[in-house]
Amino acid sequence: MKTPAADVPAHSDRALLLLSVLAQSKAPMSAAELAQVTALPQSTLYRHIATLRRWGFVMESEGRYSPGPVSVQLASGFDDNSELVLAARPHMEALARQSHESVALITLVNERVVCLEMIDSEHSLRCSFDRGRSVPARDGASAKCLLAHLPAQQRDALLDLIEGEGPAQRTARMAELDAIRQAGRAVTQGEVDPGVWGASAPLLAAGRQLRGAITLMAPLTRVAGLEDALTHMTVVTAARISRALR
């Protein structure tokens, strides 16, 4: 999504915007593509790219840019030191073994849902949600679970960013989120990736502070008749991780 000109950040925030866009891209991007997404003037864009390249955060090949080696070091440091990832990983691995399906650790970064960790299914046919992937905080079990458990002011600010929804649709969405919060889990199918079923439960630290969510995902062809059992496994796993965070 293109950043509106009025929302273009100033000074060093522009470099961080570039890094964020590159981190979310599935492939290296040209300067023209970066300019279109960020709305940065070309002279500003090249100046920040030069700085990021000099520090190793960005690398260039044949006129296209991607995260550099220092970005990899940052990611490795995050994996080794993140309290959330360290607390969640053994329970995620246990859930993946029990369910034979893929399990993701999800958190909210600004207006997007980001996968921090992924334990893949043992099946050859598996879901394509990868670590580092992000999607808008709108549809799917992960997004709806996180939105439902956010403080009301933060939730409403994110819902205001959803385009194309009238009052009736907003009312229906709020009712759905209220039901998810009451139930303590969200279950959806095909809302982000076609043919994929997902169940998500929140990770709540002390004071019911939302830290993220655990999402179990599987092809619809494998979950028929197992939905309740898989959802229960996910809720139990999230509760165990939440206790470890307290």
Image (cartoon, grey):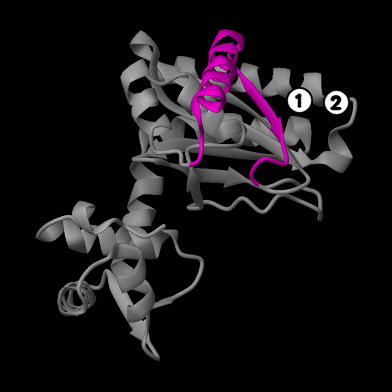
Q: Which residues are magenta?
A: 164-192
Quadrant for residue 173, please give it: top right
Of residues 170 and 17, which is closer to you in this image? 170
Q: Quadrant of the C terminus?
A: top left
Of residues 81 and 51, which is closer to you in this image? 51
User: Which residue is under mark 1?
Assistant: 230
Residue 89 lies in the magenta stretch: no
Can you say whether 152 is above or below 93 in the image?
A: above
- Give the SS element for disc 2: loop
Residue at (42, 31) in percent of width and height: 159
| Crowding near the residue tagged with mark 2, few <14, some 14–19, many ≥20 C-alpha atoms within 10 Å | few
Percent from the top left, x then y, of residue 202?
Answer: 52, 22
- Give the SS element for disc 1: helix
Residue at (53, 34) in percent of width and height: 143
Of residues 158 and 211, which is closer to you in this image? 158
Q: Which mark is residue 226?
A: 2
